[in-house]
Image: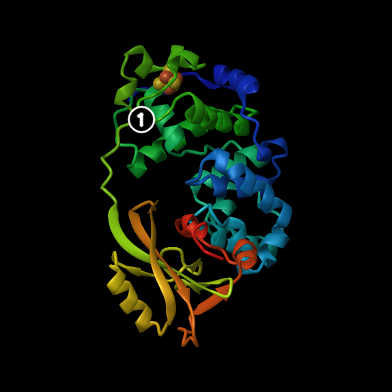
Amino acid sequence: MHTIPPIASPLLAWYSQHARSLPWRDDPFPYAVWVSEIMLQQTRVEAVKSFFDRFLQELPTIDHLAQADEQTLLKLWEGLGYYSRVRNLQKAAQVVVQKYGGQLPASFEDLKQLPGIGDYTAGAIASIAFQLPVPAVDGNVLRVMTRLTADDRDITKPAVKKDYFQRISEILQPLARSGDFNQALMDLGATICLPNGLPKCGQCPVSHLCRAFGENRTMDFPVKPEKKPRKIEKRTVFLLVKDHKVALRQRETSGLLAGLWEFPQVEGSLTVKAAAEQLKNWGIEYQSIQKAHRHKHIFSHIEWHMGSYTVLCEGSLLWDSAFVWVSQKELQQTFPLPAAFQPFVSEIPW
Ligand code: SF4
């Protein structure tokens, strides 16, 4: 196996000139680094910026986060998806308050013990906020590394990640700028050494050291198994409207989108007749039912293909007690509605 070439010096020089300006980098105090890293898991940098600012404004310290009520927390996360991230963030904040007096511990091992913090996030916080010589190895870093070394091992294997963790640790030990080194690798992976065989090698500060580039084999790396196709689920969403309010219900406390709010919906692509039957089962009287739009939402392993009906309700309603009626303002400000249902909001005839 080829050793990692001596990239530290050109990479850091490049980073000094080209580091992306990001809100959490201006003042990288531990809480800010932590929140940004959790948000950046599975979400693009551009999308995270506004969420980050709002989150830090509402919950400026770990104590505030530890004490926030769940609906406020989920509302702040609305649109980011993967809501277990924010639930774990709060659980961890509560531990930090109880065990460490509200300050994140300056230790890779202690950080890793906190809910929702794995090797990568612990490494990012330890190096960026505390300047500890710990790597932060994610898919981006593995892509860069396997190209630099023309490594054809499968990067989804834990042993490969572990190996690079060890080898990058050795590079970091003598460096004074661990946080910058890790962030430089992140930036290189995000802006130059792009995925899907599209690296911009002409702009790369370490191309002269890169084995894949030298051998004209950048398309060969990283090596990973083909993804399984996502499961497709058809669903029918009901926009039930009465007196300028729309019906919502809360999802189960476990599983996909746990505890969040949704428009009442059922499995399958219902015909108008079947939709009318469903309304009858819920005990709903209505003036009109109209087929509206179709939307697709992609989760990591599932795709929801959704069709909606707009239903103008009337009469005395024997509502399922699980439904609550909310105004437009309450929907915007109070109830966390996952991104999957957001496209339907513009279809509600308030
Ligand atoms: Fe990636 Fe190309 Fe730079 Fe190699 S030369 S690290 S493939 S961008």
**Residue 278 position in % (x across, y down):** 34, 77
Give the residue type that dot 1 points to: Asn
Horizontal side of residue 37 vs 145, given as left or right: right
Horizontal side of residue 174 vs 102, given as left or right: left
Residue occupying the point 41% across, 17% down = 210
Is 230 or 12 nearer to us in this picture?
230
Q: Is residue 326 visible?
A: yes
Q: Quadrant of ligand 1?
A: top left
Position above or below: 11 against 345: above
Is 17 or 240 nearer to us in this picture?
240
Horizontal side of residue 54 vs 190, given as left or right: right
**Residue 288 position in % (x across, y down):** 42, 72
**Residue 256 position in % (x across, y down):** 41, 63
Crowd class of label 1 (few under 14; some 14 to 19; many from 20; radius 10 Å):
few
Give the labeled residue for mark 1.
196
For the C terminus, which image quadrant?
bottom right
Q: Quadrant of residue 175?
A: top right
Is 231 or 5 nearer to us in this picture?
231
Q: Is residue 60 visible?
A: no
Residue occupying the point 50% across, 57% down = 342
Residue occupying the point 50% across, 88% down = 316
- Queried on whether the Cβ of the residue with tag 1 lies below 8 angstroms from ligand 1, the answer reads no
**Residue 272 position in % (x across, y down):** 31, 69
